[in-house]
Image (spheres, rainbow, N blue to C red):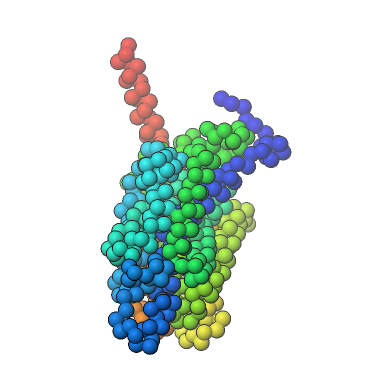
């Protein structure tokens, strides 16, 4: 057994900060994997803006009566697409459907091979996961020009590439975060949703409107490929096996954790105990409300700003990023405060932060549904304020899941991935059906639905939230160890 290292040693404290490098590179990697999927959202307005097509003047003066806006004779950037509401729904839902199918197989891959090999060996050398995301993102314009069916297939495949984002976040929190820093790790790693949208909405929107919509896909594909290579070089599954991590930092990361909890993501989850836990189910219910509204952030807000509040595509991209910046800052703040705030107990903090995020957002959506927009800043504020407030949820249900499930957080967070994508899959059909013409009267119904979902799901979470590690995080391991001990004893007896 190695001797304990003085945790107050200033020299070790200055050297032992590599976990923040891991936190940064993993956060960026998760962000641009998701960005490869939502690039479509930022380019969508330009793809359907018929007024910017070279055919538009001829259509106006009657020279062309039946234009083929997506003709193969046109350069890729000049092609425009006219879709039915169902085609729009399929274009958004394809990525989420592909994601849901692949989540649990990816959980097995992570448990069997570890995060590093799952996200780099499979991704880089076999072209199955991460670089496939870059490939499908970059080749999306070509698929779209060939046929709509092929485009939806590419969207499904692109969805497979982000099927392990929350699973990876859970694993990294368990393996690399000290118990006293779980809040900030959860905030940064779940912040990939905001970071992806913050980059993609303004940059993708500007590139699509100023240069051409295909270049938004090409740019993100190149960036994702570069970050994947950086991740492969810098990340390792275990702090104790990383050449850049000192022994002081390893002890700090594992301090307060049992041997089983520090064992990493290879532990087999006690599925029956997990699915019998009210705390886990309440947190998953909170995911439904959060991501039903989060889809407004990354998918529907640009359409609402453009069609209802009448902002230009370029201005839509710029305005969309403001609440996302606020949401990310709030998320970091709430994650830090949930670690540092000691005047209230942990479960109260979980309920408080989650309620500010969900109930606070519900209030603004309710008000937005009442006031008829007049295209001023108040209308913009009312519909985007809930987006910013969602940042407080970092100190709520995600931290609750990590605190409760400990070493089994990879599986528990994989279900978060499934629930979130399943929710957005349903939302991809529900919202276009409720608001097919993008009128305010239709969006009023959407806002009322959002407010109701937020209140109901938060209420369930507040009732059942807990802040202690579940008993099965220890009991399952003890049973496993006893079985292993019996097997070892039997082997010794048989050999004698």
User: In which quadrant of the rendered image does the C terminus lie?
Assistant: top left
| Residue 301, percent from left and from top | 46, 72
Considering depth in this image, is 247 or 425 the residue closer to the camera? 425
User: In which quadrant of the rendered image does the N terminus lie?
Assistant: top right
Residue 369 occupies which quadrant of the picture?
A: bottom left
| Image-based side of 492 in relation to 200, left or right | left
In the rendered image, the vertical position of residue 353 relative to residue 401, given as above or below: below
Residue pictured at 38% horizontal, 57% vertical: 139
| Image-based side of 383 in relation to 12, left or right | left
Considering depth in this image, is 132 or 395 the residue closer to the camera? 132
In the rendered image, the vertical position of residue 42 relative to residue 111, given as above or below: below
Residue extending farthest to the right is 10
Considering depth in this image, is 351 or 196 the residue closer to the camera? 196
| Image-based side of 409 in relation to 6, left or right | left
Residue pictured at 36% horizontal, 46% vertical: 128
| Residue 20, percent from left and from top | 59, 46
In the rendered image, the vertical position of residue 411 relative to residue 452, given as above or below: above
Residue extending farthest to the top is 496
Considering depth in this image, is 131 or 445 the residue closer to the camera? 131
| Residue 17, percent from left and from top | 63, 42
Residue 441 occupies which quadrant of the picture?
A: bottom left
Residue 454 occupies which quadrant of the picture?
A: bottom left
Residue 108 visible, this angle: yes
Residue 476 visible, this angle: no
Residue pictured at 53% horizontal, 78% vertical: 380
Q: What is the tally of numbered marks visible in this picture?
A: 0
| Residue 363, percent from left and from top | 49, 75
In the rendered image, the vertical position of residue 27 relative to residue 237, given as above or below: below
């Amino acid at each position: 057994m190695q001797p304990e290292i003085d945790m107050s040693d200033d020299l070790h404290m200055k050297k032992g900060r590599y976990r923040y490098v891991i936190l940064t590179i993993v956060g960026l990697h998760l962000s641009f994997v998701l960005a490869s999927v939502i690039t479509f959202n930022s380019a969508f307005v330009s793809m359907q803006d018929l007024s910017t097509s070279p055919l538009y003047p001829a259509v106006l003066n009657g020279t062309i009566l039946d234009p083929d806006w997506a003709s193969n004779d046109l350069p890729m950037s000049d092609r425009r697409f006219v879709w039915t509401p169902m085609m729009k729904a399929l274009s958004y839902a394809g990525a989420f459907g592909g994601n849901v199918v692949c989540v649990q197989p990816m959980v097995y891959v992570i448990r069997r091979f570890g995060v590093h090999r799952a996200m780099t060996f499979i991704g880089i050398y076999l072209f199955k996961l991460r670089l496939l995301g870059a490939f499908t993102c970059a080749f999306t314009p070509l698929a779209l020009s060939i046929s709509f069916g092929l485009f939806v297939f590419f969207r499904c495949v692109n969805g497979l590439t982000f099927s392990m984002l929350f699973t990876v976040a859970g694993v990294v929190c368990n393996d690399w975060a000290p118990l006293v820093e779980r809040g900030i790790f959860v905030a940064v790693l779940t912040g990939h949703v905001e970071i992806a949208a913050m980059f993609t909405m303004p940059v993708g929107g500007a590139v699509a409107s100023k240069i051409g919509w295909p270049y938004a896909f090409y740019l993100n594909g190149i960036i994702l490929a570069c970050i994947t290579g950086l991740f492969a070089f810098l990340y390792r599954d275990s702090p104790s096996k990383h050449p850049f991590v000192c022994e002081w930092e390893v002890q700090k990361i594992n301090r307060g954790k049992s041997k089983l909890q520090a064992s990493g993501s290879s532990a087999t989850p006690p599925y029956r105990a997990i699915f019998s836990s009210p705390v886990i189910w309440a947190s998953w219910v909170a995911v439904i409300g959060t991501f039903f509204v989060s889809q407004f952030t990354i998918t529907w807000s640009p359409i609402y700003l453009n069609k209802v509040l009448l902002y230009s595509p370029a201005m839509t991209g710029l305005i969309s990023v403001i609440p996302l910046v606020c949401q990310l800052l709030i998320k970091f703040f709430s994650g830090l405060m949930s670690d540092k705030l000691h005047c209230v107990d942990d479960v109260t903090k979980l309920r408080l932060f989650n309620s500010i995020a969900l109930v606070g957002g519900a209030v603004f959506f309710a008000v937005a549904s009442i006031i008829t927009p007049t295209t001023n800043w108040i209308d913009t504020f009312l519909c985007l304020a809930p987006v910013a407030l969602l940042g407080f949820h970092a100190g709520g249900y995600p931290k609750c899941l990590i605190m409760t499930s400990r070493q089994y957080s990879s599986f528990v967070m994989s279900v978060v991935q499934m629930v979130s994508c399943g929710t957005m899959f349903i939302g991809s059909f529900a919202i276009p059906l409720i608001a097919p013409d993008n009128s305010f009267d239709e969006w009023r119904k959407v806002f009322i639905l959002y407010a109701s979902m937020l209140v109901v799901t938060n209420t369930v979470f507040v009732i059942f939230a807990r802040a202690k590690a579940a008993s099965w995080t220890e009991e399952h391991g003890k049973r496993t160890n006893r079985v292993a001990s019996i097997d070892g004893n039997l082997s010794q007896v048989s050999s004698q």
